[in-house]
Image (cartoon, rainbow, N blue to C red):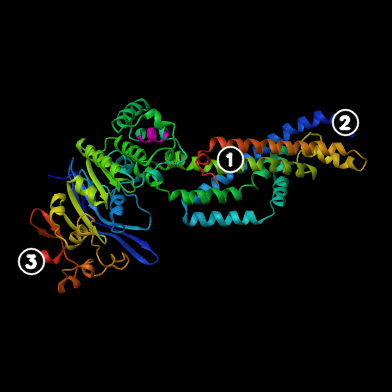
Amino acid sequence: MGTDEVGRDLFARVLHGIRISLTIAVLAAMAAVAVGTLVGVLAGTLGGKVDAVVMRTTDVFASQNHFLFGILLLVLFRPALGGAGAVMLAVGLTHWPSLARIVRGELMSLRERPFISAAVGGGASRWRLARRHYLPHLMPAVGLAFVLTVPHAVFHESAYSFLGLGLPAHQASLGNIRADGQRSLLAGGWWIALFPGLAILVAAMAIGTLAEYWREHLHPRWGSELEL
Amino acid sequence: MTELLEVEELSVGFRTRRGVVQALSQASVTVGRGRLLLVVGESGSGTTVLAHALLRLLPRNVNVSGSVRLGGQELLDLSPAELRRVRGRRMALIPQSPASSLNPVRRLGGQLLEAAQARGLSEQQSRTRLRELLGELGLDLAFVSGRYVHQLSGGMQQRIVNAMALVGEPEIVIADEPTSGLDAELVDTTATQLREISARGAALLVITHDLRLAERLGGRLALLYASRIVEVGPTAAFFAAPAHPYGRELLRALPEREGKSIPGMAPELTALPGHCAFADRCPDRFDRCTESVPDLYPVPDGVLARCFAHAER
């Protein structure tokens, strides 16, 4: 892979960058999924006015440009949390609205299913319903949202770092390396931008493959689907 | 003597945009320990609402009045926590359509254990108890544990929910349409199972529209029509000679009797008439029938019938 413009080994930097970027992306996706699930569960189980208020707030968030909103969060939190923490927070707090809507919808239809009233008739408490009956049904949606958010978060980290708002320039995240590579492009150094880009692509594909495996092997409903 | 379950003047109405749907009007029934009560009515007559009202499995837009007492304890005033101790432990429900009453994405073993543990059994006790109970019903705990609902036949699913209801040794079991969608042979099996439940000493309340099942089970029978109980009495007396014209017409509609259907339709529950709800379809109607709602009048053999034809006696 050669070296970058100051003679550092690019392969070593990309490997290190994958570690940093993936850690940030996974944590950010976990935050996004946690917020989205919480908001969706609140709206879906409490219903009524809570539902209306929560969902309109969600609409407001969803209608904003999430990248700009993320930059705002970065500017606010970077002094306190540092680059990595601020990127996690910025991505986590901007990628929950779609999941919140999905979770709410799932809960709305779940609540009407006969096995829920059968469980209540058997003496199930709210907590037991949530843990034993709602959660197993929400897992596919939540899990899918998680694996879709991880590569997306890698892109965001790259973009923020590229703009100089993410990690400090000396830290070898995939985004920072790409930003360096961009400068070298004009001097003919194409590989510096290419390899971190490929690393992002491979990471996204790897996570997607994991998701596919998870979907096929752990979700029973697909096992009973008719052949078409 | 106080009965185990005493339902008095129980009314259930649903507030909807089209007005209040009166699903159950002033229903009074009692079930003694180890006794059997059949609640018979066509779909939409309030049968399932009655079953669900006993366990307070009702949506928020509901008006409930009257009284439901289990062993002298008023159920309609219980707090959610107190209610949870009654549900499943003292009063168990065998839900309608077992296939959709079991969680489709969880293995049955977990669900069975959960049901047992919710009744206060330890894990070890639960396993032993479930193995016994399923064994009596001809199922193997190890066989069903690793499977999902859709992998079992309808009859097996029915036995699973029966086992779940019985595991806590409840004082009363409410079976909601236990034979819907089952073939004749499985109806036989279910009838046998239900009789065994009451033989164990539990009281049994069976909701059904299956008159053949009702005839086979015996006990006492309450006939519902358009949200009201129109006839109560021993099941044998009902099948020998129904006291209410609706019961008479219902039996005549059976294929093995005359196969003659009742003309007209049951009234909408949003607009119940201020007179006998069956008057429009009744062959023996007279003037009084379209003036006011009849009370339950006593008929010989311990039968009560909501019909003016019995008012004079």
- Chain bearing tag 3 is B
Q: Depth check: give the residue in front, A69 or B192.
A: B192
What span is in magenta?
B110-115
Residue B257, picture quadrant: bottom left
- The reply to whether residue B275 is in sight is no
Identify residue for label 2.
A3
Among the two numbered marks 2 and 1 on one chain, the one whose residue lies closer to the N terminus: 2
The answer to whether the residue labelled 2 contacts the one labelled 3, judged by CB atoms less than 8 Å apart, is: no
- Residue B289 lies, in percent from the top left, at 17, 70
Along the horizontal axis of the image, is A39 left or right of B2?
Answer: right
Residue at the far bottom in the pictured view: B287
Q: Residue at x 25, y 67 (%)?
A: B263
Amino acid bearing label 2: Thr
Identify residue for label 3.
B312
Q: Depth check: give the residue in front, A165 or A153.
A: A153
CA–CA distance in space, label 2 to label 3: 108 Å
Q: Are marks 2 and 3 on the same chain?
A: no
CA–CA distance in space, label 2 to label 1: 38 Å
Q: Is residue B272 above or below residue A99?
A: below
- Residue B221 lies, in percent from the top left, at 19, 51
The answer to whether the residue labelled 2 contacts the one labelled 1, judged by CB atoms less than 8 Å apart, is: no
CA–CA distance in space, label 3 to label 1: 71 Å
- Chain bearing tag 1 is A
Label 2 crowd (10 A; few <14 / some 14-19 / many >=20): some
Mark sitting on residue A143 = 1
